Image (cartoon, rainbow, N blue to C red):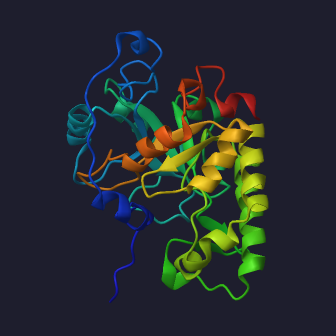
Amino acid sequence: MKKTLRRRELLAGAAAAGTFAILNRTPAAAESAAPAGAPVIPDTDIPLVDYHVHVEAAPTLERLVEISKERGVKFGIVEHAGTKENKYPVVLSSDEDLKRHIASLEGRPVYKGIQAEFVDWATCFSKEVVAQLDYVLTDALTFREKDGRHVELWKAEKVKIDDPQDFMERYTAFNVEVVSTEPIDILANPTFLPAVLAKDFDALWTPARMKRIIDAAVKNNVAIEISASRLPRLAFLKLAKEAGAKFSFGSNIRGPNVGKLDYCLQMVKTLGLKREDVFTPAPPGKKPVQVRS
């Protein structure tokens, strides 16, 4: 039987093959500008944080903490969260689940997050417990089809698209819905396309479609993830920077290659990003779940 790739395995393939090197040095003047315990990118005051890290059987949480120190990258640990309809080895689906996740990260030098699944994830939790997280990350890769089915766009064998233009209009609208209606901090894996459409990526992601998502992100104070899987591409990122969007970094890599942020660092330099362009978790009382609903 053909093995089905999980979302993280598919998106992280290109990033895991690259090399990563960063000098473990923190300019004294920049140290106070970074979140507590976060290194900064050399010659900048930008915190170097991988907000898209999952705990797997290997490496364990303990090993992830070691890797974080070795690479000079602070990690944000996320677990999938939402209804049991979402099939993952672990899916947090209640306040009790979420409290256990938060407790497991207490005292660790990491940020506490979740990767929210589909648009109904918030129905599983109270606002009070969600507000105990540092941030909520989600994407639009579990897509709602016309008949209401949930389609996992990263699974090539499950995706059938007869009319690419119709799909793109609905997919763009779904991205806007996710950003506009959910109390989230970060939109992950932006502009990902199913394999069947990959060859037409640049033609399908028109400036108008990109701008709709970017404008929604800026309006709702949602950061756009620059993913180590080389998404979004430079055209999107330039539009986002011009619009005043915030950016976060994420490897979404499973295993020992986690925290390799080559593409993110490249885009920081290419775009000339500064500290004010980069996401920082909101303080207590200012979380999206507290101010957007």
Image-quadrant location for residue 2: bottom left
Image-quadrant location for residue 164: bottom right
Give coordinates of residue 135: x percent, y percent.
54, 35
User: In the rendered image, which quarter contains the C terminus?
Assistant: top right
Vertical order, 20 against 145 (above or below): above
Give coordinates of residue 77: x percent, y percent.
40, 40
Can residue 40 be seen in this snapshot? yes
At horizontal 73% and vertical 28% (from top left) the residue drawn is: 291
Q: Closer to the camera, 258 or 15?
A: 15
Give coordinates of residue 289: x percent, y percent.
67, 34
Can residue 122 be seen in this snapshot? no
Horizontal side, residue 183 vs residue 198: left or right: right
How many discs mark residues in the rendered view?
0
Horizontal side, residue 291 vs residue 231: left or right: right
At horizontal 67% and vertical 55% (from top left) the residue drawn is: 120
Vertical order, 268 against 124 (above or below): above
At horizontal 50% and vertical 85% (from top left) the residue drawn is: 157
Q: Closer to the camera, 176 or 58?
A: 176
User: In the rendered image, which quarter contains the N terminus?
Assistant: bottom left
At horizontal 58% and vertical 35% (from top left) the residue drawn is: 130
Q: Closer to the camera, 210 or 58?
A: 210
Give coordinates of residue 29: x percent, y percent.
41, 10
Q: Closer to the camera, 20 or 58?
A: 20
Horizontal side, residue 219 vs residue 98: left or right: right
Image-quadrant location for residue 65: top left
Vertical order, 199 against 107 (above or below): below
